[in-house]
Image: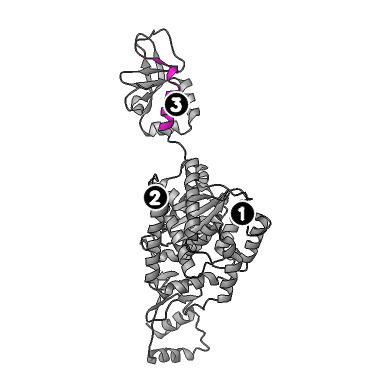
Amino acid sequence: MSWRRVIARLVNVGLAVPAAVAMKAIVEHLRMATVTMRLRLVERGGWHGHHYLTGSGTVGARSNDMPVQARALYGAPDSNEAELALWQEQIARLAQDNSRLVIALCAAFAGLCIGLLDDQGGFGIHINGSSSTGKTTALAVAASVHGPASREICSWRSTENGIEAMASKHNNRLLILDELAQIDPRAAAQIGYMLGNGHGKQRANGAGRQATTAVWQLVFLSSGEISLEEKIAEWAGAPTMREGQAVRVMDLPADAARGHGLFDQLHDFSDGSALSDHLKTVASRSTGDVSLAFIERLAIDTDWARHKLSGARASFVADTLPAEADSVARRAYSNFALLAAAGELAIELKILPWPPGHAVKQVARCASDWIKARAQSQMPDPLSQAREWLHRNAKNFMPWEGADAATESEFGYLRKEPMGFLLRPKAWQSLREFGGNIPTALKEAGLVRNDPARRPGGKLIRVRILDGRILDGSSDDL
């Protein structure tokens, strides 16, 4: 490498060269200097072995080959214990016994822990409810771990074009998104999936070769007046939420059902509004020393931290997962488990001033509320709805075989061989009104077709034929 290129790189990262004549002298000095420690330049923040890279520098023991970023070539400043103590008194203490605030804080610490666990995928919690429930308070409380809420809380709208850059910036960290309603439903479905999936789109560079794909591992916390499932339902191309989306973005009702909106406990404040105002005011002044203090204590022994997190995750699932849980709930509980484990680790490291077990208790409460909300919002299976409609309308079908050909049904016919239901327009309209997704589901399953049919001894009529296989080939129970 020529000396000019050396100087160019140094200037590019901030070296001030007083005069052109000094350039060769600088290079000669570097050539003769004895290197006692090397730094490893990396692009992404987050965990790199036993070190964590923040925007202000590297946290962890100084060592040979210590990872650094170009914009922060030194160790991060030490956390301020006085700021941590103030945060514990003014925010963390008031979050205690408030399930939604507890899970928000656990999400902040889980974002800082997730990079220690190779087997943990990214995911998000979406807190939804009316504007008066206090959703933004939960976001502000979570943001206070990292800094002032005004800096930490982003909008869903800002993710439409900058999602990959934003996700990379928040690698091994909490990403906070507000106001789901601002984004297009198609984009919401794709972004929620992408954030949890952990990598961006594959692209080609100017030379036609595959460009480096952005990757990340993060936890995100979101809010909106409607759930992600309801938002996706606004998009005609995706009327229902896929299992992968339900696991990557878990919808949690904002209302804690205690009569105070988001809050379970008011801690001597006159009402929820007063508590909310206090928390948001304090969060706006946060310095970010909480996250720095937590990372410092994790970096002392990352192997111990991994062991504690893995054990706590397994215990949470074993102790709280309902026996009747389906595959989606089982996968979701593994994500709730990280939230609980990170919270308990923050308690053990004297960051959260809560009694041991408090994070597990409150996260388990939220997980249970998630299951209840999911059961209430799940749309019934369209084919099951079609079977229910057939049972309710069995008396309206005339027999196809052996009946008087001169007598016609305005509704439809039941045919025994081959078994099927011949639906006239009145029946088809009734079926559509019973469940809007039924016709599409029947067509996709190959159970319905348009076809003319002639009654024995009668005339040709146009009908929709619903295959008898929908009842497993038997109509004995009709």
- Disc 3 to disc 1, C-alpha distance: 42 Å
Q: In this view, does 150 lie above or below 233?
A: below
Sequence-earlier tag: 3 or 1: 1
- Residue drawn at (59%, 65%) of the image: 91
Give the extent of the magenta segment.
Answer: 384-401
Label 1 CA crowd tier, 10 Å (few <14, some 14–19, many 20+)? many
Mark closest to the chain's N terminus, 1 or 2: 1
Query: Which of 251 and 34 lies nearest the eye of the viewer?
Result: 251
Assign the magenta stretch its main secondary structure: helix
Q: Name the residue under label 1.
A: 134
Q: Which dot, 3 or 1, sits closer to the camera?
A: 1
From what the image shows, is residue 174 above or below residue 327?
below
Q: Residue at x 52, y 44 (%)?
A: 230
Label 1 to label 2, Cα distance in Å? 29 Å
Across and down, in percent, residue 443 comes to 39, 31
Which amino acid type corresponds to the residue marked 2 in the rendered image? Arg
Q: Where is residue 405 in the image (x, y as percent from the top left)?
A: 39, 8
Residue tagged 2: 330
In what quadrant of the picture does the N terminus appear?
bottom left
The one nearer the camera, 231 or 247, is 247
Report helix, strand or loop for mark 3: helix
Image quarter for residue 158?
A: bottom right
Residue 212 visible from this viewpoint: no
Give the amino acid at mark 1: Gly
Write down the residue under mark 3.
389
Dot 3: few (<14), some (14–19), or many (≥20) neighbours within 10 Å? some
Residue type highlighted by circle 3: Trp
Which label number is shown at residue 17? none
Q: In this view, does 252 lie above or below 423?
A: below
Q: What element carries label 1?
A: loop
Which callout, 2 or 3, points at the residue further toward the start of the chain?
A: 2
